[in-house]
Amino acid sequence: MNQKSNSWDEYLDRLAEKLVEFGYESCPICGVNPKKVKSFISKLIKEERKRVYHLGAIDGEDAMAENYKKYIIPKLIKEERKKVIEEIEKLQVQLAGCSVAALGGIKNIVRKGDYGWSQSYQDVLDLRKEFEKLKTKIT
């Protein structure tokens, strides 16, 4: 095997690892299980070697590698980053809700299924309600 083939094999291994790491059950482009991406793409390359890819002087194998490097991997990373940011924002809202409930903001409560609801929020809300009941009994 030449250096190019070794590099390509390593790249496909990393691609499959990233798909699994990001939680994809199938490749968003080809629909194949991440563990089978390498063999699937290698099979495609063998079938497509007969065709000509018109990307300058790049041959078919390099064209597919360039496609994955330039378009597919960045797309996967962008999608994953968006999911992570959305989750962080939701957790920040939930944490703020816990703080509001702890400080006595229990008039406009969030219900289970609402964006800002969490079990921690519900626990703090329940404790605050109990605190308010005990407080009224004492005074």
Image: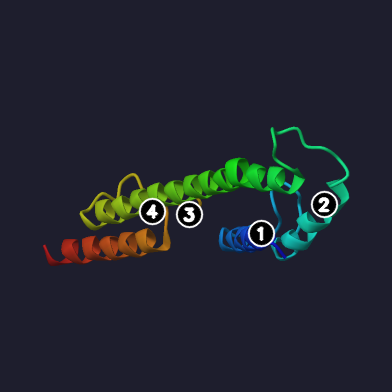
- Mark 2 Cα-neighbour bin, 10 Å: few <14, some 14–19, many ≥20: few
Left or right of 105 on screen, residue 89: right
| CA separation in Å, label 2 and label 3 | 48 Å
Mark yes or no: residue 116 visible.
no
| CA separation in Å, label 2 and label 1 | 13 Å
Left or right of 81 on screen, residue 130: left
Q: What residue type is labelled 4?
A: Leu
* Nearer mark to the viewer, of 2 and 4: 2
* Nearer mark to the viewer, of 2 and 3: 2
Image coords of residue 88 (percent x, y): 39, 51
Q: Which amino acid does label 1 sit on?
A: Leu
Q: Which of marks 3 and 2 precedes in the sequence?
A: 2
* Nearer mark to the viewer, of 4 and 1: 1
| CA separation in Å, label 4 and label 1 | 34 Å
Residue under pointer 4:
91
Q: Is mark 1 on a helix, strand or loop?
A: helix
- Mark 3 Cα-neighbour bin, 10 Å: few <14, some 14–19, many ≥20: few
Residue under pointer 1:
12
Left or right of 13 on screen, residue 123: left
Q: What element carries label 2?
A: helix
Q: Residue 113 carries which label?
A: none
Residue lying at the far left of the rendered structure: 139
